[in-house]
Amino acid sequence: MRLVVVGGGITGLAAAHHALELARERRIALELTLVEARERLGGTIATERAGGFLIEAGPDSFLSEKPWALALCRRLGLEDRLARTDDRYRKVFVWHAGRLHPLPDGWELLAPTRLAPFLSSRLFSWPGKLRMAFDLVLPRGIADDESLGAFVRRRLGREALERVAQPLVAGIYTADPDDLSLTATMPRFAELEKQERSIILGLRRARRRARETGVSGARWSLFVTLKEGMEDLVAALATRLQPGTVLLKQRVAGVERRGDRWRVATAEGADLDADRVIVATESHAAARMLRYVDPSLATLLAEIPYASSATVTLGYRRADVVHPLDGFGFVVPHAEKRALLACTFSSVKYAGRAPEGDVLLRDAGTRRAARGARDHGRTGPRARLPVAEGDAAVPRGSPGACGDDRAPRRGAPRPRPRGRRLPRRRDRRLCPVRRGRGRARARRRRRLSVRGQERAFVDVSEPGFGRALDSLSAPGRLTVPTLDGDA
Ligand SMILES: Cc1cc2nc3c(=O)[nH]c(=O)nc-3n(C[C@H](O)[C@H](O)[C@H](O)COP(=O)(O)OP(=O)(O)OC[C@H]3O[C@@H](n4cnc5c(N)ncnc54)[C@H](O)[C@@H]3O)c2cc1C
């Protein structure tokens, strides 16, 4: 059997690997070709090393809760190369009114589970806390599905949505919670309401059960990564393919049906016959490829919008950062009207990301916020780097030394299809999700959540992002760039 896989990101590589596993198991002679448009495999996944730092340009981890990535690593024999988070620093901060506030101990994504830390938290106002407590008495909702935003507003109030749920969800889906289906993105909370009525009580009971059954001592943390970076997974998959299997720098222009076979043609002139084709590209690319094979599917795929985001990774000397960095990072609510969405304290969250005595911080923000970083990376005069008062936080190294290839680039968005938003109409070929109701459904029809990426690199700072990080060195205060671009 001849199989052609289009797209050499993690999806295409994992599909190719699994096809080989099945063929071996079922004793099928499989002739496999993987076609990738770029000059490298991995798609969004890219790990770089510079100056002793390990920098993830794309994903920096996967969730152990969704077991497939972990299972793949096991099958590839990578288990001893996996790394868990340093759970001494599990805290996450929220930027609110000029300060970093820790999420109260026991906070579980949308709701509190422990009373004392919740009551003493300065992240929420007293009316906001009281409104969250209404969850204890509110009846169950009646909708089959609703937007995540509507759900949190209904159960816990606007403050819980604006100060915590929205920035945490934006960090995962780069999307507005009002555009996301609750059952598609956080089915656990829909179930909790159905079974337990109150989210807070349901979460508390689940915690108690986990303690009793000893689940909390699980081997893997929620976020799992590879010690040498996520590209290790790409390399391991690539080495499982026979030499000659991968065609790089070949952009598939069209897929065509020929009787009971397929023809895959690339813009560079390659022409491949196949019994089966797996398309594992960004959905807009798949739409173009499949427009003559299945126009209605192509239309659905083309409707999926790609929201770009940018990551800027900065290396600092530890001594130059006054903030204790005693957490995994912080998120910035949309209501704060800043360009910065989140910052991960990468070298705190994962061991081995920075040389001894240094720290690595990764910002995620809007594309506009990264523009300045790109310019600084190109021209690189150190004098233009924002330096906190009294030289408290001097970014490490000279940006000029980074070279153009290290500077953030604007390019085709790299999609992040992590959200399962509702398609225009239910179509099992696209994704098996339930339809929502009312306004939320109308919005979801317009957009599916996919996240793109701009490339960014270490050492480069930019007025907005840089000042935000520099001001970590001013105890208790933090300045993050506004959406207008000025700090
Ligand atoms: C900044 C960022 C951070 C992220 N962080 C996380 C995280 O921490 N954890 C997590 O689980 N996920 C994360 N994600 C999401 C995750 O990276 C993606 O879901 C995943 O990498 C997508 O893989 P893919 O193979 O489906 O697509 P891609 O990686 O986009 O691969 C698609 C491939 O298809 C190729 N292609 C496109 N058109 C053609 C064509 N015509 N012919 C041939 N080849 C073509 C492309 O060149 C590309 O290599 C993040 C995403 C971003 C952008």
Image (cartoon, helix red, strand yellow):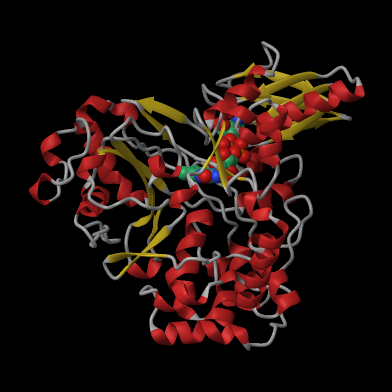
Instruction: Left or right? Give the position of 278 relative to 79.
Output: right
How far from the left and from the top, in percent, is residue 290? 70, 40
Q: Relative to 27, is 302 above or below?
A: below
Name the one closer to the observer, 72 or 365: 72
Q: Residue at horizontal 53%, vertical 72%?
A: 114
Quadrant of ligand 1: it is top right
Q: Residue at horizontal 33%, vertical 66%?
A: 337
Name the one closer to the observer, 314 or 202: 202
Furthest residue toward top? 243
Name the one closer to the observer, 312 or 408: 312
How far from the left and from the top, in percent, is residue 139? 68, 87
To which quarter of the image does residue 209 belong? bottom right
Number of marks drawn: 0
Please indicate, yes or no, whether residue 92 appears anywhere in the rendered image. Answer: yes
Q: Relative to 240, is 69 above or below?
A: below
Quadrant the N terminus occupies: top right
Q: Residue at horizontal 47%, vertical 76%?
A: 116
How far from the left and from the top, in percent, is residue 35? 64, 24
